[in-house]
Image: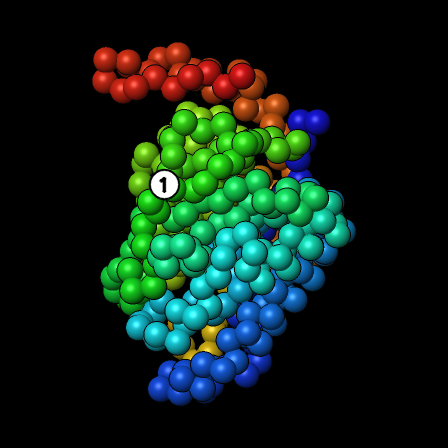
Amino acid sequence: MSVVTIAMTETCNVFPDMPARVADLGVLTGKLDALRDANLRHHAELIGLAAGQGAAIVGLGELFAAPYFALDHYPQFLALAEDAATGPSVQAMAHAARTHGVVVIAPIYELNPITGRRFNTAVVLDRDGSVLGKYRKTHIPQGTNDKGSFHETRYYQSSDGQLGPMPKNRSQNPYFPVFETHLGRLGVAICYDRHFDGVMYSLAANGAEIVFCPAVTFGTKSQRVWHQEFFVDAVRHNLFIAGSNRKGTEPPWSITYFGESYVCGPNGLVPNRSTHSELVLCDLDLAELRSPDPSGWNLPRDLRPDIYSPRPARS
């Protein structure tokens, strides 16, 4: 089967009892389980809706089970971190994957129960709900733009490459796994990772066909280049790239996430045929990745090995 239908969510925190003021965020300390549960239910519903439109793979948003809390230092949100195998988010999304028979990419806030370290992690679930493995965000940003600031280094660390056994991982790079599924080979990059040229190169070099890039991004420059970066990488590395961004405004903060999620491939933008405002749904023809480039280009053949490491041909 060369045509694979994928979906991405484009939504934001749905917990109704968020405080009106940032100064009052402390009231959430005893409500974090309820906050997570509200978002898990919402995303389980979206997975069902995506499956009903024909999706076989559903990618959820970065840190999907919570508001984007890394806008400053709010220590109470540290308690949202959970185990990447047995935590409530993974269990709920595994049930949704199993119920609807779809592969799910679930980006969670991970707590390693052995080391106590926290990571921004995407767990990849097969259609039977089993865990295929995980990817930990490699590049962690901290900065300020025209819309606000982000302080992710206060909440989680950069990937340590210690991702555990993953029998269906075909990558030789310990930081960037590539998951073999019945639908194709999947890679993940998370938000800030997309700016670094080695990320998509490594995923493509290790066989990825579709890369999901869940993000929480905002700001004028970020919005402008959001529509450029994936196109270049998809063409250069012969990939389908699915970029999902949070959409909406999350109280009590005033930042609006612009959404504008899309999928592109080596031949350009893939049409979105979703009938739901919080989903992007696209049909990907993986045969494009193995067909002669209609431009006449042959980048793997013409790469200068004396300058760059050659990329192996996709089998």
Please name the residue shown 65% across and 32% down the image. Answer: 183
Left or right side of 252 for 35: right
Q: Nearer the viewer, residue 34 or 184?
A: 34
Q: In the figure, residue 23 lies in which quadrant? A: bottom left
Q: How is the image coloured?
A: rainbow
Is residue 238 visible from the viewing direction of this image?
no
Q: In the figure, residue 220 lies in which quadrant? A: bottom left
Q: Where does residue 140 sit, x and y in percent of width and height?
A: 31, 53
Tell me the residue that label 1 is attached to: 161
Farthest residue in the front direction?
114
Please name the residue shown 32% across and 50% down the image. Answer: 158
Total marks drawn? 1
Q: In the figure, residue 75 lies in which quadrant? A: bottom left
> What amino acid is at disc 1?
Gly
Asked if 112 appears above or below 255 in the picture, the reply is above
Q: Nearer the viewer, residue 296 or 39?
A: 39
Asked if 16 appears above or below 246 in the picture, the reply is below
Q: Where does residue 276 sit, x and y in percent of width and height?
A: 67, 58
Q: Nearer the viewer, residue 224 or 64?
A: 64
Q: Nearer the viewer, residue 67 or 301?
A: 67
Please name the residue shown 58% across and 68% down the image. Answer: 39
Left or right side of 289 for 225: left
Please name the residue shown 49% across and 82% down the image. Answer: 30
